[in-house]
Image: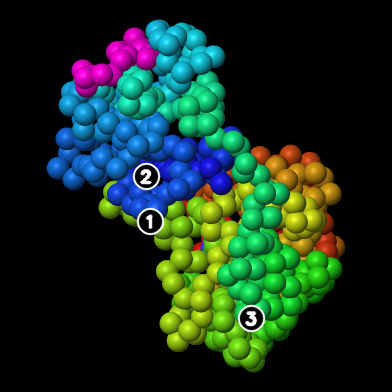
Amino acid sequence: MDKIVILDFGSQTTQLIGRRVRELGTFCEIVPFDRFPSEAPDVIGVILSGSPLSVYAPDALLPDLSGILDHYPVLGICYGAQLISFLSGGKVGNSGSREYGRALLNYVNRDCRLFDGIDAGSQVWMSHGDSVNSLPEGFIPAASTDSVRNAAFWNPERRIWGVQFHPEVVHTADGKRLLENFVVGICGSRREWSPDSFVETKVRELQAEIGDGKVILGLSGGVDSTVAAVLLNKAVGSCLTGIFVNHGLLRKNEFEDVLADYRKLGLNVKGVDASSLFLGALKAVENPEEKRKIIGRLFIEVFEAEAAKIPGVEYLAQGTIYPDRIESRNITGKVIKSHHNVGGLPEHLNLKLCEPLKWLFKDEVRSVGLSLGIPKHMLFRHPFPGPGLAVRIPGEVTPEKVHILQDVDDIFIRSLREEGLYDGIWQAGAILLPVRTVGVMGDERTYDYAVALRAVTSSDAMTADWASLPEGFLRRLSNEIINKVRGVNRVCYDISSKPPSTIEWE
Ligand code: XMP
């Protein structure tokens, strides 16, 4: 399949470049700036990303591009454009002040194919400290703005293009068109990438890789592990055993409901109820990190014990997706986020790792799920943390508190669905506060728990805003919770954004 390779120089928007290329129906791989694949028969073009660094910085990333330039069509974005210029003998300089934000193209060279259908006046998004002051030999200006003369340039003979602005962000009005001009017009992509084609190819690959080997997969009810399981089931059927561990900290009825959903999908799944083991181990533990560690350790122990009961297992499958792997990498020395799926599997398991979704972005996982016939309610559910309700019960976790919180959470989530608010929210849940407060019910004084409700909007959980839920909805919800859930007499709504607050309370 035709493929664009994106060399990552550590920009915050490298993933977005990948998203845009995929939206153009073209497969792409994001690789570290110095890891261009040595065998690359399907590569039709290369994009160099931006970077927080300057080409003159002592720690500048200056890979040898001789195997790429003049071999493939190349598009450099921001740092990528400066790098091309720098390596080809042009002059890159500090533009005096960091230029950040909207600018308008005041000139477009009509001979440049990158700008087919894009006219002067089009808005672009700049984010840079350096710019290309004088072009290398053979390069021609392609577009300018008031403050950047060489906002875009190209070398027609060598099939190299550079843009100082960021076509991958939505603020560049014709960014999608520009990338299409490169990927389809210049590189000649046949646009073969689609959820259906992915399923077809991946099923064949998995059959070739696994044959009749046995595979185990930890299922959580989450989107990624569900899609991975259904894909593997299509490829190798009963060779796959899914293991779904109930740690007793799931949502109300979640274990039974999700198991029933899995069975309807024809999956071979073993449900393991280890609630009392987990809740027993959490007794009297108050420290949030300690809780997480206990749950993580027991989870692996239970999973391994179940895996050991299946003879001849060769593969451990995981629902790792592309952003998990990109976020975990470290291009410029600044780790953005480490991820629990990545970091290798315990060696003593002696299993081969199988990650069928490792090239997919989250929305592509959902599209592949739809193509596989997985019901929407399983694919478009809110994220839920691995340690479950334990991180929503500050202080000691007891079976009584879990039960109360499950009831509150159930009313909250059901109400969001009934009022049509669920899909507009990234994530919602309730927190049981470790305080009791005084109230009155009828003629009686009560002394019960307070709960907090949290609902946020977000696109990736890295930042989040509290969701502005309708007042009438909150009023009805609070009444229902206090009237129906024994042990709760007060409801608060969390109005903190991330940062500085996190989505979970622990
Ligand atoms: P925070 O609380 O850091 O959460 O703003 C960001 C996203 O990550 C989820 N989360 C977790 N997921 N194990 C998980 O699998 C965890 O320990 C964990 N902690 C937080 C959280 O629900 C949100 O979606």
Query: Under tag 3, what secondary structure?
Result: strand
Query: Do callouts 3 and 1 mark residues in contact (Cβ within 8 Å)?
Result: no
Residue 225 in view, yes or no: no
**Badge 1 is on which residue?**
329
- Decide whether residue 468 is among the magenta residues: no
Disc marking residue 247: none
**From the viewer's perspective, is residue 128 above or below residue 21?**
above
Identify the residue under disc 2. Answer: 8
Residue 214's tag is: 3
Task: Report the residue at 38% width, 36% height from top.
Answer: 72
Residue 5 in the image, given as x and y percentages of width and height: 43, 43
Q: Label 3, label 2: how many angstroms apart (C-alpha)?
A: 36 Å
Look at the image and say whether residue 144 sits in the magenta stretch: yes
Q: Is residue 358 left or right of residue 34?
A: right
Q: Quadrant of ligand 1?
A: bottom right
Foreground label between 3 and 1: 3
- The answer to whether 126 appears left or right of 24 in the picture is left
Q: Is residue 122 left or right of residue 400?
A: left
Mark 2: secondary structure: strand
> What kind of element bears circle 1?
loop
Residue at the spot 14% in from the left edge and 42% down from the top edge: 58
The reply to whether dot 2 and dot 1 touch (C-beta < 8 Å) is yes
| Segment tinted magenta in the rendering | 133-150
Q: Residue at x 58, y 70 (%)?
A: 209
